[in-house]
Image (spheres, rainbow, N blue to C red):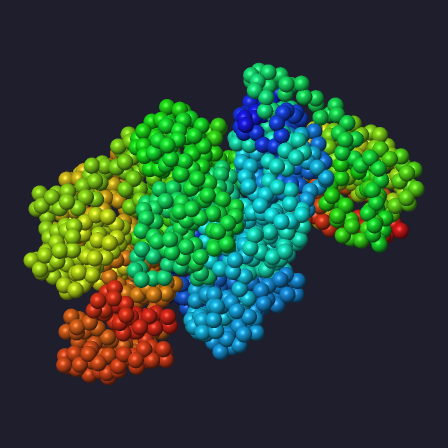
Amino acid sequence: MPSLPAAITALGAGGAAAAQRAPVSLAALTPGAPASLSKVLIIGSGPIIIGQAAEFDYSGTQACRALREAGLEVVLVNSNPATIMTDAEVADRVYIEPLIPEVIADIIASERPEGLLATMGGQTGLNLAIALHEQGVLERWGVRVLGTPLDAVARAEDRELFKMTMTALGEPVPESETVASADEAVAAAMRIGLPVVVRPAFTLGGSGGGIAATLDEVQTIARRGLSLSRIGQVLVERSVAGWKEIEYEVLRDGADNAIVVCNMENVDPMGVHTGDSIVVAPSQTLTDHEYHLLRSAALRIVREIGIQGACNVQFALEPVGAASRGPAGPGVSPRYYVIEVNPRVSRSSALASKATGYPIARVAAQIALGRRLDQITNAITGGTACFEPALDYVVVKIPRWPFDKFPGVDRTLGTQMKSTGEAMALGRTLEEALLKGVRSLDLGAIGLWHRMVEEWSDEDVWTRIRTPHEHRLFALAEALRRGATPQELEAASRIAPFFIGAAARIVAAERRLREQGAGRADPDPLTSSALRDLLRLGFDDRAIAHFSGHTARDVRARRLALGLRPTYKCVDTCAGEFPAKTPYYYSTYEDEDEVPPAKIRAAVILGSGPIRIGQGIEFDYCTVHGILALKRAGWEAIVINNNPETLSTDFDISDRLYIEPLTPDDVRAVVEREGAQGVLVQFGGQTPLVAAIPLARGGVRVLGTSVESLDISEDRRKFAALLRELDIPQPNGWTATSLDEVMAIGAREGLPLLVRPSYVLGGRGMVVARTMDVLREAAIEALAGEAGPVLLDRYLEGLEVELDAVADGTNLLVPALMEQIERAGVHSGDSMALLPARSVHPDTARVIVDYAARISWALHVRGFLNIQFVIWKGEPYVLEVNLRASRTVPFVSKATGVPLVRLATEVMLGRSLTEFGYGGVALRPAPAGWAVKAPVFSSGKLFGADPLLGPEMRSTGEVMGAGPTAAAALRKAFVAAGVPPTLARSLLLSVADHDKTEAADLAAAALAAGFELVATPGTADALVAGGVPVRAVDAGEAVALVRGGRIGVVVNTPTRGYVTDRAGFALRRAAFELNVPTLTSLDSARALIEAFAS
Amino acid sequence: MRAVLALDDGLVLAGEAIGATGSNGGEVVFTTSLTGYQEVLSDPSYRGQIVVMAYPLIGNYGFSDAALESARPQAAGFAVRWAAPDAGHLYAGSPRALGDLDTYLRAWNVVGIAGIDTRRLVRHLRSAGVRCGIITTDDESPGDLTARARAVPDLGELDLVAQVSTPQIIRWPGDGPRIAVLDCGVKQGIVNNLRARGCEVVVFPHDSPTDDIRRESPAGLVITNGPGDPARLRGIAAEVCALWDAMPVMGICLGHQILAIAAGATTFKLPFGHHGSNHPVRDETTGRVAITTQNHGYAVDETSLGGTGFDVTHHNLHDQTVEGMRHRSLPIFSVQYHPEGRPGPQDSAALFDRFLEMVAAHA
């Protein structure tokens, strides 16, 4: 038996005690269950990418808990440090390691688990299990796959096998052919008839798929899909675009009991990926006959495939009786097709769990252990888990897209998922759930209105309705405002009339308010019954005020005077039929409120809402730990969040869970209802922080750092003044409100300058201007976007150093300094970070900690403090301060072992760091090893997006690599981020003019490390001049080499960031599509060479 | 227009009127079925009851005559959180379209109420038990409304089966075995299931003399669902008892209770009944669980089945009540739930196959 490679680190407190735990004989529990199972390996899903997000931390963590409750030892592997599942408390042994078969094989060899639970880690987990099976690893070590067997997985996922299985069962599948080349795809499309859907086998979120209306499009999409499919296959399929898309979430146990937890209906008909569709639960427009026609089919399918656990079945159902459709009518059995089966927990199952309260992953894990559904308890009612939840509310899920980060990217929606996150809302009417959902997206919309619609021409509106688009919902409402009829919208969008009707009722209410506000009708629009009707339609004070011309304050005062407050209803899985034991609530305007009074002092923690670039799962990690710390401190922890993917919205994490928008008004209502002592705003990223000031103004107590200090840290001018007062250096900054002003500052102060709009989340709209041309373009861009001035900063190109600290007003705990691999100018969220910082002189480190302490004292920080510095000419300058948890808190916590969130929570509650042994102002001693955080991008999903690093954050997730040396940690992080462990040591260099001098040093280092070099002509000239021999290839040849698989790594630094029609973009794009590691910064390239030096 | 729902225990909820104006009283029950409001409204088992839909959005897909369990709405009243307006156009142009919820109720003079906190009502009924109540568009004081609710007769005092059963024999042609259906309030879905299996179906009035049934020499007998208290139906039970030696018998819902009474067992009233499409039932003979449609306010007392010749075959996983039984020696079985679904799952439709296998074996 090979020993555990030293480089693989097992965290976790489990160790010896856990190893001694007696094996549980499940055979005794259930006949047919795997015998003598004592240790189980669970594979996580790795970094957050589009199509694979926080839902797998939620499901994986639930599974870990269920397995440990059953007395099993759990070994967990995941490369994503920003997950609760990788906490030492969740599993017995935790490996934060690259998710590649080689590494998992080593872990299996060393840990010797008897079972593998592969259905909790998304497509990544499933693909790894299949690879391990194919490589004989599972057989060699006697590891059994628990739950759904791999042959069943293949029947669900292998397109041809799936089709055969369905055909044999008599379930209709769209006419289709599986092909292995683009030419075959075209031939198949000609036989089937256009339009067709082309989708690759075994990919995430439909990567590389699309609808083709021409043979040329078939060819293009097939080529892309083939390169992405794990088995080199794509499916060409008859398109059922426009049909209803319906999903069923099914659980089946080993004794063949099967239930449907929830069905869901996509508001956007077939043709839009369900991850990009507005989804309602339960289905709203299906008759009982249709509902059960598909339900019965789902159960037959799940039985035939052989699922043992959770499964998602998707159908296309022909709309019946829609005006534009054929002769179908009531009584005629509708036609349907089976579209897809996911033989595992999924984003949809996370949504279904939150929508119903039924914990699918937890039950699936118990089924994997051999339990029958009727032997499992429904934790909400204490009754059986073997039933189908009944709802007495409407659930609406709305996706959130990252297009604001990617100028030039195609914002239309299709079969390939593009959204990064989603918000869920519950209401007693569809309108209410819809409007709460829109509020939860945090887009600055008021009801179904957003100021952007004012700039749309009629054509803009209709384009967004005809072709599924990010803003289709707003376009539908705007078209209604401009006089379109619901019938016209149905014909243009093929969205069911029922849903258009909801938008129409909302817009009609807007119109009434406007008319009343203008004094043309009822002089007092805020009568009791009118106001109540609006509230029951989901309007909030702000929307009522906006459309009626009152102030939100007046509307609120009037509402309260009339006794109209939200009531909170319980999500109980049973529509009130049985008493519920879990406190999971949503607001609505009804008679009865079900929230019992708090037993002890309570505080409200605000989550971070939908995942978006810059506000990812890291903040849910912090939210969950905040909740746990609050409970541990003896408080009742109340959480408000609306992201159905996350662990924080699991019903048994907090004492009370509210699925609500995170606007100040919605939060205030909960705080008032609960009589909570205050709110904690430092965990959920920028969203809660932005809510803090209006909350405080509304009389809500913000615990921890004062709102005044938060305001200073968020207000650039006030903060600059504070640093000047403290005599702490910062890059010079200017504010300009016009293009002329920007250009004048550029001319007067010199370049480079950092340009950005004043409203910033995740570095939105930031550009480094090195030339006056770029400055002009960037300024135009920034001025065109959000209202407000353009901010200009002196751009200091130096080493960026970051710290996450906890302060209590006196003491300051700095667990470590991180240095960014990429120089300032690359957004810290997109930069690789090394911990501890190795390039910072101890004297400089002391200065940094001193600055941090002075800032914390000046701002009376009680809680988190995140500071980014740039070291320029040996001097640290403060770039940015955040008085909240930053996205590196999970990474720092895991790399140093310091429980930052817990300490910060205690401090917010008034305790001192001294009580926890962290008194004084200190940088903690460096940890024993090294840790590297590396960003992971989803640009492959967003065609037209440039996979290029810049000051604007674009990564969606991160991985961690740990090792005894910096090089080892770097290598692991690179591998975890997708660089092949057996990287071909051939480097293609194509760099910008200002990088050419430095590129020579890099090239020399690469040669010394054993890399072969080629370079584009300009770069080659510079390298040769610098004394490095290199072969020159022109731009076309460079792309050909990449496409031919001849290049291991591409290093391409761009001259002008966001101008995309350049040869460099073509090169980066080609490399990206073929999964060739592409580095757009010389610093990352240097790190890669260090990591892979032979 | 304003409408009010008042219970006999003083609870008064005000909402908007849907359907007809006027008043109607009945036992107030709730169902948790998410879909199938047409089937619920037209299910004869709801005769004499005011049905509260726990799911808040009702009428979303309009009304058509394809989804009715009987020719008319049977519920005494209908209470919903939200009634979909303008859903009638969904089947525009179809001769089978019956308009939206409001139109349908109005056409049949059923008084309904919308806009009330139905969850509050469900929770109230769950803890207070079923109550009598009224829905009215009359403008009266809460005290008067409560008094009127108290005046609503108890379900056990009403001869509801007689109101819903067919007055004369109805024949449905078929090439297969002739099945007699004793109509205590039969759902169209039961007839359809038999016909789909080729049976010739003869539907008999609930009070048909045994000889009338024998005269048709049916190969099997189905005793159907229906409204009201089974304890009132000793007459039917006696008739059934006289027939069951002669042919295989399947009982559904009320039919199951009638069989139990015929065998000498007793029934009792459940606190708030079982009404929904999500009830788990375990077949104790196989260990398998099926999700079933249920609509009953009474249940068979398991202890009273001792010595009757019947064995309990099915239990409800929620409250362990009897959900099915079979005779030890005779080809007789019955279920408390609805294998025909409508609304609800089709998981147990194979029970009709099982019955026809018994019929075939007996022939």
In this rendering, the answer to whether A749 lies above or below B273 is: below
In this rendering, the answer to whether B152 lies above or below A1039 is: above
Percent of width and height locating residue A1009:
24, 76
Q: Residue at x 63, y 61 (%)?
A: A171
Would residue A776 appear left or right of A343 to someone viewing this image? left
Q: Quadrant of the C terminus of chain A?
A: bottom left
Q: Quadrant of the N terminus of chain A?
A: bottom left
Q: Can the viewer see residue A808 in this picture?
A: no
Quadrant assignment, res B36 = top right
Q: Residue furthest front?
A: A520
Q: Residue at x 31, y 51 (%)?
A: A455
Q: Residue at x 27, y 33 (%)?
A: A696
Percent of width and height locating residue A173:
59, 63
Percent of width and height locating residue A555:
34, 30
In this rendering, the answer to whether A600 lies above or below A462 is: above
Quadrant assignment, res A418 = bottom left
Along the line of sight, the residue nearer the viewer: A752 or A980: A752
Q: Residue at x 29, y 46 (%)?
A: A686
Would residue A260 appear left or right of A694 to someone viewing this image? right
Would residue A888 appear left or right of B143 to someone viewing this image? left
Percent of width and height locating residue A142:
53, 64
Quadrant assignment, res A305 = bottom right
Q: Can the viewer see residue A1077 in this picture?
A: yes
